[in-house]
Image: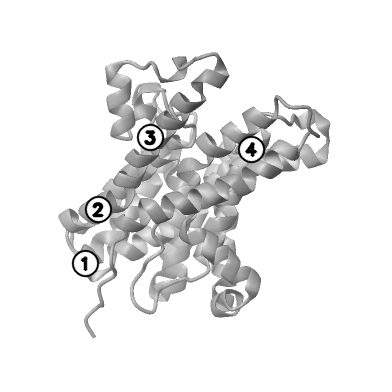
Amino acid sequence: MTPDASSPRGDRYRTLDAWRALAALAVVVFHCTNAVVTADMGWWARALLSGWAGVFVFFPISGYCILAAVWRAENASLGSFLARRWRRIAPPYWASIALTLAVAVAAAPFNRGSLTDYRLTTTTWLSVLTLTQVWLRAGSVVNPVYWSLCYEEQFYLVMGLTLLAPGRYRLHALMGVTILSGLYHFAQWPAGLRVEGLFLAYWLEFACGLAAFVWIRRPAHRAWAVAVFAIVAIAIAVSGSLGLMISAAAAVAFIALSKYDDLIASTNAGAALMGVGAFSYSLYLVHVPIGGRIVNGLHRLPLPLLVPTLVAIPGSLLAGWCFYSAVERRFLNAARPLPS
């Protein structure tokens, strides 16, 4: 997931914030229901438990926005690009770790004093602090949503490295990485070269967003976007990955709806979703420690099945907005005007 929807002047896709909101809300619903609902309860339960798909909408949003960011004037060098990414992502992430631990300590008296989930080795804690825990097969420790940020971190590094080459070679380099990721989905890929936590496992989901950006904003290179979608289609046929299907469908929807961007943004529903999208990174970071605790606490009371969920969802939204106002907002990168 990326929290930054900025792009070059004239290239801003306003309603990506609405897509971001929908993806975040889907993940929130999933985590606020999976403790009280099971798939065998019916179609409605399976629908609620499908919210995990929101993560695979975040990946192409990230691809679109980060490729746009790479073309921004203030991101002209690897150092400036990574510094801006670090400032935007890391401090709120670390603050969310502190919040998660504080909530766990506060809730301990009501959970028989158990904090065993946070008794990790020094190596594991260091991996959590550096967003490398997926390399240790520990992507779900502390907070289960952190795993996707580990891959985002690698995507940012790869995108930043393209700044070391002349701009005319950027898409060539990204095509090379995309082809490599496509091959990674084949069972014939050598087992010794299949590394746990490596970005290639989810690069194609991210690349769907790269292709959407190129199709919409760089029409002279649409053949490149078509090639990326072709590689994605082959990977889907080979792997049957539902997550990749969702990312590809989302990217195609971005393209199809881009012509209606201003129209959708001007509607009440669009504006409301864009408002939520503005703090969706904070919502993503804190909804489990807050919403999850609400569900766990209320689930012990003799309440109708979905009441804990119906309380936890707005509680998560409020927590996300408060976290954004108190923490994330302080680390937003100010947009600089591009030269005429």
Camera-near label (3 vs 1) is 3
Side (left or right) of 112 relative to 147: right
Q: Which mark is residue 277?
A: none
Camera-near label (4 vs 1) is 4
Chain-order first, disc 4 or disc 3: 4
Q: Position of residue 255 (x, y in %)?
A: 54, 68
What colouring does the structure picture have?
A: one colour
Q: Which mark is residue 97?
A: 3
The residue carrying mark 2 is: 160
Element carrying mark 3? helix
Give the Cα separation between the discs numbered 2 and 3. 26 Å
Give the residue type that dot 2 points to: Gly
Give the Cα separation between the discs numbered 4 and 2. 36 Å
Side (left or right) of 192 relative to 160: right
The residue carrying mark 1 is: 74
Quarter location, residue 294: top right
Give the residue type that dot 3 points to: Ile
